Structure formats: C-alpha cells, structure tokens
Amino acid sequence: MNIIMKRTLLFTLLTMFAVTAAAQKRYDEIKYPKLNEFKKANVEEFQLDNGIKFYLVEDKELPLIRVTATIRTGSLQDPSGKEGLASITGELIREGGSENYPADKLNVLLEDNAAFMSTFIGQGSGSASMNILKEDFDELLPVFVDLVSNPLFPEDKIELSKTQRKSGISRRNDDQGSIANREFSKLIYGDNSPLTRQIEYATLDAISREDIVAFHNEAFVGNNMTFGVIGDFDTKEMKRKLEKAFGSLPAGTENNLIYPEVNYSFPSTVNFINKSDVNQSYVLVGHIGGLRENPDYAKLQMMNQILGGGFAGRLFQTVRTDLGLAYAVGGGYGSNINYPGTFSLFVMTKSSTTAQAIDALITEVEKMQTNPVTKKELDDARDRFLNSLVFRYDSKQKILNERISNEYNGLSKDAFDKYVEELKKVTVSDIQDVAKDYLNPDKVQILVVGNAEEVGDQLQKYGNVNEIDISIPTPKSDKAEVSGDATKGKEWLGKMADAVIAPGTEFSSVTTSGTLNQMTPGGAITMKSTTTISYVDYSINTKLDTPQGTIEMEVNENSGKMMMMGQEQQLPPAMTKPMITEVKTGYLNIALNADDYNAEYLGMEEMDGKNYVALKVEASNTVTFLLDPETALPAYSKTSSFNPQMGKEVEVLISYSDWKVAKGVAYSYAHETKLDGQVSSSSKIDTVETN
Amino acid sequence: MRLYKSIRVLLFSVLLSGMIGYQASAQNLAEFEKKVTEFTLDNGLHFIIIERHEAPVASFYTHVNVGGADEPVGNTGIAHIFEHMAFKGTKYIGTTDWDAEKKVIDEMDKTYKSWLQEKFSSNPDENVLAEKWAKFEELQEKAKTFVVNNEFSEIIQNNGGTGLNASTGADLTNYYYSLPSNKAELWFNLEADRFKNPTYREFYVEKEVVREERRMRTESNPIGRLIEEFVAVAYTAHPYGRPVVGWNSDITATTIEDARDFYDKYYVPSNITIAIAGDVDPKRMKKLAEEYFGDFRGKGEIAPPVTTVEPTQRGERRFTIEGNSQPIMIIGYHGVSDSDEDFEALSLLGNIISSGRTSVLYQKLVEEEQLALQVAAFNGFPGTRFGSLFLTLAIPNQGVELDVLEQRIYDEIEIVKDGSITQEELDRARTNIRAGIIRGLANNTGLALNFASTYMTKGDWRDVFLQLERYNAVTLDDLQRVANKYLIKQTRTVGATVKTDS
C-alpha cells in the first residue's frame, strides 16, 4: 500500500467517523406526540315520500357542491342476447341529454360553467352525479333532475355509442392484462354467467331505443335512488331545495338485483392464450373465493395482508425483491358482498421464467398452510392496518361514501367498526387455519397469457394445457335473410351432388397439385402448391413452394401449425377456422353430405351476363351456389365471413371453371376468389387424386 | 416506483401540472399566503409547508430536478434505477451488518464491471465470461445474506404510512407518501437517511425487476412500444428521445459505480425541493428540517445542466411498428419548453381543439364522422423543461383507415390555422382551467406535489396561481400564430402501430 492510498484511507476513515459522530438518531428512538383529535363529519339523513334517500354533509373548504345518486340497477339485469343494455343506457342518459337540454345545449352549458355531470351503470349499481361550483347550483340542479328523469335517448347518439363500442370490442384482445382478467373470471364463474358475459357485436345490434327507454324508466325511480350531497352549502336550505327538485319523481318499485348461484367444483386446469407480440407472461392462479358475511372474514383479510399486502407481503418479498422475477405481483382471497369473490394471485414475468414464477406463487400459498406465520408478521400486518385507519376518514367525502355504500349493500352502519374489533383478535393460528380451510393450492386453475413460442412447454408439467380461443364472435350479417323454396332447393341440391360426385363413388380424401396466385399488398406471388384434404376428419395438409422456401401447414378442426425453414409455429384459430369453414362449405363436402343439409331455391340469378340457379345451402355456414342450369355444376359460390381486420362482414365469391371428371368426381381446375369484389387469389390445378 | 408513461397519465399530468395555476381572483393566492410557510436551509435545500388541518394526516413530497433527460449516454434508465434503490434501506435499515455487506457489494460491483468489460470487448472469451459471471453470482448470493427484506418500506407502512411510491419522468424524480401527522418526524428521519446514505443494496436483482417493468410498460404494451419509438424518431440529438426506463442494454451496462456518480452529481440540495401538506406545525417542521437535513451533502453545488439542443428538423418523419393489435397513431410537432412565451398558447390550443365534448376534434371526428374512437391533442411531451412536442393521439374506429383519419386531423388543423377558434372557445377553456385549479387544491398530496414542482420549475410556488396572468394574456391571434408557427409538416413526426400480417 503506498502512502497516497494510506492517506486516502485515513481521510475516508476520518470522514466516516465524522459522519457517524453527527449521525441522526435511529427511527425507533423517536418519541411521537399524540395524534390530534379528529371530528368525524356529521351526516344528515332524510327520505322523500317517493322513496329517495338523501345523505348530506357540509364541507366548506372549497366553493364546490357534489351530488351523487346511487341507483339500484345493473348489467346483471341485461336480458340474455342484449348484453350491453344497462351500460348503454347509463352512458346515453348523459351523452344524449334531456328533452329540455339536448346534448349540444347541455355540453355548452356545462363546459361554460366548468361543471361535470355523468351517468353510468355498472354490474351491480348505477350512478348519476354532478360536480359544480356552488354559485351555479340553483341553475344546474333543475338541469340535473331533468337529465336523470327525462333523458332523450336520440337515435344518432345510440348509433354513435354502438359504433364506439364495436371499435372497443375489436380492441379487447390488444391488452394482455384485460384478456387475462376477463378469461380468468370465466374460468371461475363460467362462460355464460351474468357475472362474466361479454358485450358482443350481435348483442349490441339487438338493443333498440325502446329497450333503453324501458330500462331507464324502471331503474331511475325514487325507490331505487340514494343521494349523497356534499359541499359548501347550508343543510337546512339544501334540504328544501332537494325536496322541491326531486319530490315529483315517480316512486316506482324497488329493483330486485339477483346474483346468480355460483357452483364451483374446484377443477385443476391449465390454460393458455397466445399473444405473439409480447415477451412477458401474464399469469393468474386461483380458484373461487368467499362472501363478506363469512365469520372468518377478518382472519382472511389478515391472511391476505401477510400473503400479498403491498411492499410488505410475502409475494412481493419473494417473487419481486428476492428473485427479481417480476415488477408486478400480488393477490389474495377475495370476499364479495353479493356473490363469492375470487382467490387469485397474479404475476407478470418474462416468458422464460413463467413456470418458475407460478411455482413461486404456489409455494407461498403452501407455506401459509404448512407453517404458522411469525408473531411479528401478524403484528406488523395489524399495525399497518390500524395505524393507517385515520386515512379511512381523512376527508368528509370518504365518510359520506362509506355511509352510502353500507346502506346500498345492506351492511350495518357500524359494519366497519365491528370488523376492526375482529381484526384486533386474530391470532397466528387463525391465519394458518383459514389458509388451510379456504386455500387449495393443489386445486387451482392456472391461466397464462403469453408468447407461445417463448413460453414453450413450461406449462405441461401442470397438466394438459387447454388453449383458450379468444377470437371475437362475428356479428350476424346485416344483409336481409332471403328465403326461398325448400322442396325445389332439395331437388337442385341433389342434382348438384350427383353432378359433382357420380352416384356410387366413394372417397375419403382429395389431393390436388397446381399453381396458386396470391395477391399481397406487395403484389402477386405465384407458388406451386400441393394440398390434401380429408373429408373424414376435415384435416388439411398443404405444401407451398414460396420464394422464401417451402411452407407446410397442417390444420384440423382444433388446431393448426405451420412449418417453415425448420421452424414450427402454431397457427391462431382466427387463421385456421376460416380454412376449415372453406372446406366444409366447398362443393365437394356439400355434395358428399347433401342428405344432411337443408337447401332453398332462390330463383334464377344473373352473373356476368349468364343466368344461374341460385341455391342456398345451410351447411356449417350458409353458402349460396350459382349452378349452371344445364350441368347443375356450380359456377360460383358465395359466402360471407367476418374479417376482424376490416371490422366488417366480407363477401367471399369463388368462381369455378375448367371442370374435369376423374374416377367419378368432377373437379374445377381453375378457380378464383374475390373478397368484396377484389380478386384475392386464383388457382390452376394440374392433377387431382381421390382416395 | 413507476414511470410517467401512459398517455392517460400524461394527459392527466399535463392538465394538472401544466394547466393548473390558472386562477381568476387573487383570493385563493391570498388565502394560501396565510397557510404556506417556506424556508431554505443553509445548504440550499428548500421546504414548503402547507397547513391543512382537516384531518390529523400529512403528505410528504420530495421533488428532485433530475430525470431521464439528465442521464449520461450509455446509462439510460439510471434515474429510474436510482429511484428503485431509494427503497432499499440505509446503513442500519434493511441490513444485519452494513460494514460487512458493503465489502461484498463493492466486490460484487467490481466483478460485474470486469464481466461487462469482457462481454463488450472485441473478442470476448466465453470461459472467462462464465467464470466472472459465476463469481458475480456467488457474491450476489453472499450479499443477500445480509439483507432484511423491504425493511424500509415496512417501517413506513407499519406506522400507518399510505400511498408510498415514487416516479421518474423525463424531467423529474419524485418520492412521496402520507403519514398520520403525529409521525412527521419519522418521515424526516427516514427521508434524510435514505438520501444521505444510499446503499445500492440488491442493485443487480432490482435491475431485473426494472427489466420486468420495462417488459410490462413498453415491450408487451402496444402504446408503450409506440411511444418509445416515437420519441426516438422525433428527437435526433436531445435526450428527450431516449426512454426513461432505459434501453435494455443500458440497463445491463449500468453499475453501482454509475449510480453513485449519478447520485453525487444530481442529489444535491439545490436540486431538491420538499413540500409537506397537512395537519402540521410549520415551526416544528423547520426545527426537524434543520435537525435532519442540515448536514445534507453538496452545499453550494449545482447539478450539471443539459447542454444538447435539438437541431431543427428538416422534414417530416414517418414510421410504423408492427404488432398484433389494432392501430393507434401519434402525430407530433416540435414545440417549446415551458419557459418559452409560446408555451401557454400551445397548451390552450391543445385544450381547445380536443378537450371536452364541444371541442372541434371530438365533434367532427368522433361524433359526426365517427372516424375515431378517441382523439386527444396536448402540449408538453415527453417533458417540459426542454423543447417539447405537441402531440395528437388518434385511435381510429374499426374499419377506418389510418390515412383517412390522419388527413382529417390535418384538415381541421388547417382550419384552426386560418383563425377559426372563437373567443367563446378560448373563454370556455380558461373557465375550465380555473375550476380545475380549485378542484386540485382539495387534498394534501395534490397540494404538496403542485407547490413543490412549481417551485422547482418556476422558482415560486405562487406561480401555481400566477400562471393565470400568462394564460389570460393569450389572445385569439396568439392561438392562430402558434398554430401556424409550430404545427407544420417540416417538423412533424407521424408514427403508427400496424398489424403484422397486413
């Protein structure tokens, strides 16, 4: 060690010593003064003859007044097939304006006064609120009353809302987290539960203005309304104004919100949803949860604190801090008021550590069961809760909100105080007991939304991996249903079947080879192709010689894969399903199974100057053939399918020509496909072989 | 422990911090003069105390004038990594034996640096790399044995602390939480300790946490990917073009020594402002400030300024990024910093054309023509300390081609350039800003955040209210002038996400 270094060391030591000498006291040596007294706000309560309940709190800090109505209604009441009705109604009360204040007038009036009004209907409750400067109260209160009692629901706003919601539907698979939470909820409560139903293109189309008007009329009546009013006002005067403004609303009848029965059988499942453009897996693991009224509620909440309670929870400690596996991790045992909650743990981790993270989650649950938590963990968790209680009532708004929420949910005024008392009594063994009683780490459902290629086979060790199809159900075509002559239809279908397949001919698969000409945004690509289609199990095997090399595709009704340059890639259902549909609605399959299908004769139809027999066949999808009246061979077929990228129904028109017969089977050696009038591909066939 | 990232947060913060401070009467300012006490310690650290005795609670907010824009080349993301490290404890919190731990940490960092050197050498030797990595991992495991997991955060939470968090943006880093007001001294104790004695504990594990945060917010998120690419294309030279979370390889390259250098330069008293709002006694706060922060290092030191100036853009830039999601488009124009006299006019312009149901972009493109699900224009991205962007975010309805929507946005901007905005629209925007300010003063956290950040950027918390004068001075001619000056094709960048297979 040279002298300079020694000196540096000495200097460093001295500095360190100096710092230590002047160091501040330790945090645990601080003596805290007593917490200042805190007056809980006074809540004034009254009810009108029409059933409306009011809760008033004066808060003079700022010159504002907020009025919020909680409405007993919800999307739980959406009729099946009209999912979205409650939500649209809630949105349009505000968006459509009222009879005296139509949308344009209302928007200008509110924005000129920096006032907000909003209306909303969620799953188990609705709301209508206004937030305004106090000097505008007398002017805007009648506007608000008119809005909630006489909404206009103009057709153009209904259409706008539907268009926007349809765009929303088309985007619902863009975000990993929303996919995961939506699909996990279906795993827990079932696909068709009112708790998990989705708004679809078709359900939006089914909603009429009359439905909306009726839904509003039933929900927005006195007996369903509870108002909270807070702000800079005098209670006595406010009472008078509210009585006058809301007194004439109809009383109506109280809505009975019915929550579905949840039957859960604790299945162990492993589920995967592929999202090719992510490099992180969104993982959810869990099973059904419980009810708020459970006597073990307080114990379970303490268990949640220790397992997944923020920075201090074990999940955060282990999965994030120790293992560095995630930024976002957490979860717990959910207890709902009206229906069982969900026990779920979540983690977002890079694809390659998906299984490691799942194991870590499950291990933490198991540890809660096998070992008691430490006394310190429990005391800390309780301290966190009790010491932060003051924040629960740190504003008058919070006090009012809790009061109304208890009232709406049928909880007693002191529900929370009782819960606090119970929390104080929870013991170390209580935590282990509820962990054992309520958590089933060996009977969980696992859902991963991630990148299939990167995740690989990590999930297989948990069991059979079920790939969930999240493709968006396509809307029914808005084209008018045409119906025709069924007897004549069956007759022509028989003729077509005999023309395509000579009676007595048997085959199970067809192999064709030829040249495919595919249009792409970059121009046409020509490639040699060989395809074998099995008409027994509807599997397709295709080999394409492309400029980038040979591509092989294997597709069946459940899945599909593509092999290219030694790489294997799963094909999404969005891609494979239309291929299967095309085979099923192809003339060969229709001819093979002609007896199973109903058909209608739609009359003669002209196409490119020639007249054809129009024959509509109800196969797996509806297909209309234009038959040559002489030969009964199809010259064209028409189907329509929903194109998710274009967001609309697309008409697929295929023309068939150059018919040749071999071994009793007629085959079109030249066909061309048009999508909405644009040529998308054409094929020339060289050889056809039936087996 | 998060980033100013999503557009929604961005919009909110623009509305809140950029626009708030527009006040009709001097009444509010006079009222706050009575409630606010401020003082500067000898070392230059500034405190703002806002009394609000509504409930026995208080919010504590530390604003550091350093963000992604200040980072050295090759260490993008370091401001954010440092922010994460500020939760790792001090010399006695979070450790069983700091002296022993420190030796291991130093050794670990040295090993990591030599691994980096080998890895990025012209001809890295795999065996040497593996050997160094094994040694690094061994030291990392050894360092872990001293760690008391998350003790720092737990002390805060066990004492009733809520809202514990921090965030890093292009311009700033902030740290905040609330406590029952009788525990104010705990905040002084812990805050002083963590910024006087950073330990860089668990540094390399935490970098992996940060990488997961990057995957979550940027790499696996369509809008996150688009924004990262957007600023990278729009800025050629200025650090606003870099991601605040850092490039992945820069996260790899950043060492404890880098973080220490960063701290030494930027965490000096002149670069920090602290605000406390709630049920507190200013005299006691001052006494505690002197006791705990009086010996804070770096008296008289000034953090290095950003000297790079973005050169004038010479033509429109366009790009697309491929993904598996529905299209989103961003159109951005180079604008000004918040110290420029045109800043308020541009902010008002964005507000008038796209905020609220009466705005022209909403009425025409969302409501009448139904081309867009959403269109939002706002000024001041990704930060406002330096020349920033005026952005328009557009989300098309399904079936609407991006170029159709893009052209319609330009059409409407052209009409604005011809002077279509009315006095009524300008007045309405001002009224809403005025009300926005009142609504923003109703909670401790909002007060502390606004007052501290305004002091840091404008030199006076009163500017929260005094900004009004500047907004009031904006005329219709100004709106037309700034639209014509800044919203031009030459300095425009247009980026969009497109489906991989289309």
Image (cartoon, rainbow, N blue to C red):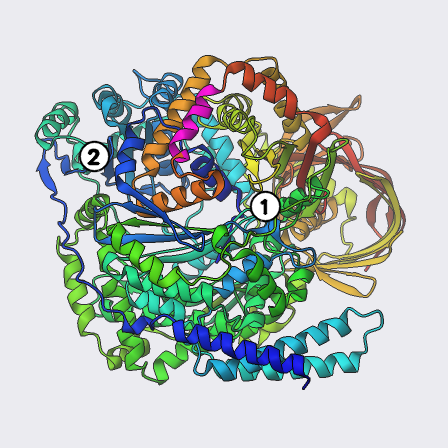
Q: Secondary structure at mark 2?
A: strand
Q: Which residue is mark 1?
A: B223
The x and y percentages for residue A654 are 76, 37
With A554 as the anchor, is A262 left or right in this view? left
Going by the image, does B210 lie left or right of B155? right
Residue in the picture at 69% in, 41% down: B235
Q: Residue at x 46, y 74 (%)?
A: A318
Circle 2 chain: A
Magenta span covers which residues?
A: B463-473
- Residue A307 picture location, percent across and down: 37, 72
Res. A442 visible in picture: no
- Residue placed under numbered mark 2 in the picture: A231
Q: Residue at x 60, y 53 (%)?
A: B218
Is B472 covered by the magenta stretch? Answer: yes
Dominant SS type (magenta)? helix
Q: Amino acid at mark 1?
A: Ile
Same chain assignment for discs 2 and 1: no
Q: Total label count?
A: 2
Task: Please identify, in this view, whether the residue under mark 2 or under mark 1 is nearer the observer.
Answer: 2
Q: Residues within 10 Å of mark 2 (few under 14, many from 20)?
A: many
Of residue A468 and residue B284, the one placed in the foreground of this image is B284
Secondary structure at numbered mark 1: helix
